[in-house]
Image: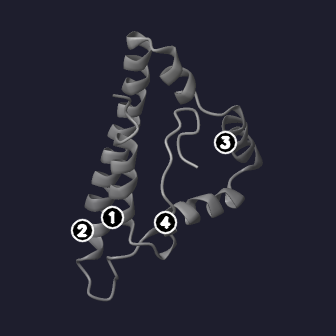
Amino acid sequence: MSGPMLGIGHKEDLLRTYLVEMRTYMPPSHREFLGSLEARGSVRPFVESANDPELTELYNACVEQVERFRSLHLEYAATYVFRQAQTDAKNPHAVGTGGTPFMQYLKKHRDETALHVLR
Protein backbone atom coordinates (compact mmCIF):
# COMPACT_ATOMS: atom_id res chain seq x y z
CA MET A 1 0.00 0.00 0.00
CA SER A 2 2.45 2.69 1.11
CA GLY A 3 5.28 3.98 -1.02
CA PRO A 4 4.99 1.59 -4.00
CA MET A 5 7.76 3.35 -5.91
CA LEU A 6 10.20 3.08 -3.02
CA GLY A 7 9.06 -0.39 -1.99
CA ILE A 8 8.07 0.74 1.49
CA GLY A 9 5.64 -1.77 2.89
CA HIS A 10 3.82 -2.14 6.16
CA LYS A 11 2.74 -5.20 8.07
CA GLU A 12 -1.02 -5.63 8.23
CA ASP A 13 -2.82 -3.59 10.88
CA LEU A 14 -6.24 -1.96 11.24
CA LEU A 15 -5.04 1.45 10.05
CA ARG A 16 -3.48 0.02 6.89
CA THR A 17 -6.68 -1.89 6.15
CA TYR A 18 -8.76 1.22 6.77
CA LEU A 19 -6.58 3.41 4.55
CA VAL A 20 -6.89 0.94 1.67
CA GLU A 21 -10.67 0.91 2.20
CA MET A 22 -10.73 4.74 2.16
CA ARG A 23 -9.57 4.68 -1.45
CA THR A 24 -13.14 3.89 -2.45
CA TYR A 25 -14.06 7.41 -1.28
CA MET A 26 -11.31 9.13 -3.28
CA PRO A 27 -12.05 10.89 -6.54
CA PRO A 28 -11.57 8.41 -9.41
CA SER A 29 -8.52 10.24 -10.75
CA HIS A 30 -6.78 9.91 -7.36
CA ARG A 31 -7.52 6.18 -7.20
CA GLU A 32 -6.25 5.78 -10.76
CA PHE A 33 -3.06 7.66 -9.93
CA LEU A 34 -2.32 5.41 -6.95
CA GLY A 35 -3.14 2.35 -9.06
CA SER A 36 -0.76 3.50 -11.80
CA LEU A 37 2.07 3.92 -9.28
CA GLU A 38 1.46 0.49 -7.82
CA ALA A 39 1.31 -1.11 -11.27
CA ARG A 40 4.80 0.20 -12.06
CA GLY A 41 6.36 -1.59 -9.15
CA SER A 42 9.22 -0.48 -6.98
CA VAL A 43 12.61 0.96 -7.88
CA ARG A 44 14.10 -0.69 -4.80
CA PRO A 45 15.16 -3.96 -6.50
CA PHE A 46 16.89 -1.96 -9.25
CA VAL A 47 18.72 0.21 -6.72
CA GLU A 48 19.80 -2.86 -4.75
CA SER A 49 21.09 -4.67 -7.82
CA ALA A 50 22.84 -1.60 -9.30
CA ASN A 51 25.44 -1.60 -6.52
CA ASP A 52 25.91 2.13 -7.11
CA PRO A 53 26.65 4.10 -3.90
CA GLU A 54 25.36 7.36 -5.34
CA LEU A 55 22.07 5.79 -6.45
CA THR A 56 21.72 4.10 -3.05
CA GLU A 57 22.33 7.42 -1.33
CA LEU A 58 19.61 9.08 -3.44
CA TYR A 59 17.18 6.23 -2.76
CA ASN A 60 17.88 6.44 0.98
CA ALA A 61 17.32 10.21 0.91
CA CYS A 62 13.86 9.59 -0.53
CA VAL A 63 13.02 6.99 2.13
CA GLU A 64 14.27 9.35 4.83
CA GLN A 65 11.99 12.10 3.51
CA VAL A 66 9.01 9.73 3.76
CA GLU A 67 10.09 8.95 7.33
CA ARG A 68 10.31 12.69 8.10
CA PHE A 69 6.82 13.20 6.69
CA ARG A 70 5.50 10.34 8.84
CA SER A 71 7.22 11.83 11.92
CA LEU A 72 5.64 15.22 11.27
CA HIS A 73 2.25 13.58 10.67
CA LEU A 74 2.64 11.74 13.98
CA GLU A 75 3.54 15.00 15.72
CA TYR A 76 0.47 16.77 14.29
CA ALA A 77 -1.78 13.85 15.23
CA ALA A 78 -0.42 13.95 18.78
CA THR A 79 -0.82 17.71 19.09
CA TYR A 80 -4.10 18.34 17.30
CA VAL A 81 -6.01 15.10 17.78
CA PHE A 82 -4.69 13.02 20.67
CA ARG A 83 -3.97 15.80 23.19
CA GLN A 84 -7.06 17.81 22.27
CA ALA A 85 -9.30 14.79 22.70
CA GLN A 86 -7.98 14.30 26.24
CA THR A 87 -9.54 17.60 27.35
CA ASP A 88 -13.03 16.06 27.56
CA ALA A 89 -13.72 12.75 29.35
CA LYS A 90 -16.58 12.03 26.92
CA ASN A 91 -14.20 12.19 23.96
CA PRO A 92 -12.25 8.95 23.51
CA HIS A 93 -8.64 9.77 22.73
CA ALA A 94 -7.25 6.31 22.18
CA VAL A 95 -8.97 5.85 18.83
CA GLY A 96 -8.91 7.89 15.68
CA THR A 97 -9.27 7.29 11.96
CA GLY A 98 -11.61 4.36 11.42
CA GLY A 99 -11.68 3.58 15.15
CA THR A 100 -8.01 2.60 15.12
CA PRO A 101 -5.47 3.22 17.90
CA PHE A 102 -3.91 5.76 15.55
CA MET A 103 -0.94 6.86 17.66
CA GLN A 104 0.31 3.27 17.92
CA TYR A 105 -0.16 2.64 14.19
CA LEU A 106 1.32 5.95 13.04
CA LYS A 107 4.42 5.20 15.10
CA LYS A 108 4.55 1.69 13.65
CA HIS A 109 4.27 3.00 10.07
CA ARG A 110 7.00 5.57 10.70
CA ASP A 111 9.30 2.97 12.24
CA GLU A 112 8.65 0.47 9.42
CA THR A 113 9.49 3.19 6.90
CA ALA A 114 12.87 3.75 8.55
CA LEU A 115 13.67 0.05 8.17
CA HIS A 116 13.63 0.44 4.35
CA VAL A 117 16.87 2.44 4.21
CA LEU A 118 19.44 0.37 2.30
CA ARG A 119 22.61 -0.40 4.24
**Res 103 label:** 1
- Label 4: state its secondary structure: loop
Q: Given the image, on which type of amino acid does mark 4 rest?
A: Asp
Image quadrant in which the C terminus is located: top left
In-image side of 21 versus 72 (left or right): right
What crowding class fits label 1: few (fewer than 14 Cα within 10 Å), some (14-19), or many (20 or more)?
Answer: some
Which quarter of the picture shows residue 77?
Answer: bottom left
Q: Given the image, on which type of amino acid does mark 1 rest?
A: Met
From the top left corner, tell me how far across and down residue 21 is, in percent.
64, 63
User: Label 3: which residue?
Assistant: 34
- Mark 3 or mark 4, earlier in chain: 4
From the top left corner, tell me how far across and down residue 42 is, in percent.
59, 32
What crowding class fits label 4: few (fewer than 14 Cα within 10 Å), some (14-19), or many (20 or more)?
Answer: few
- Mark 1 or mark 2, earlier in chain: 2
- Mark 3 or mark 1, earlier in chain: 3
What crowding class fits label 2: few (fewer than 14 Cα within 10 Å), some (14-19), or many (20 or more)?
Answer: few
The Cα atoms of the two marked residues, 3 and 1, are separated by 25 Å
In-image side of 112 versus 82 (left or right): right
Q: Residue at x 32, y 76 (%)?
A: 93
User: Label 4: which residue?
Assistant: 13
Residue farthest to the bottom, as pictured: 90
- Mark 4 or mark 2, earlier in chain: 4
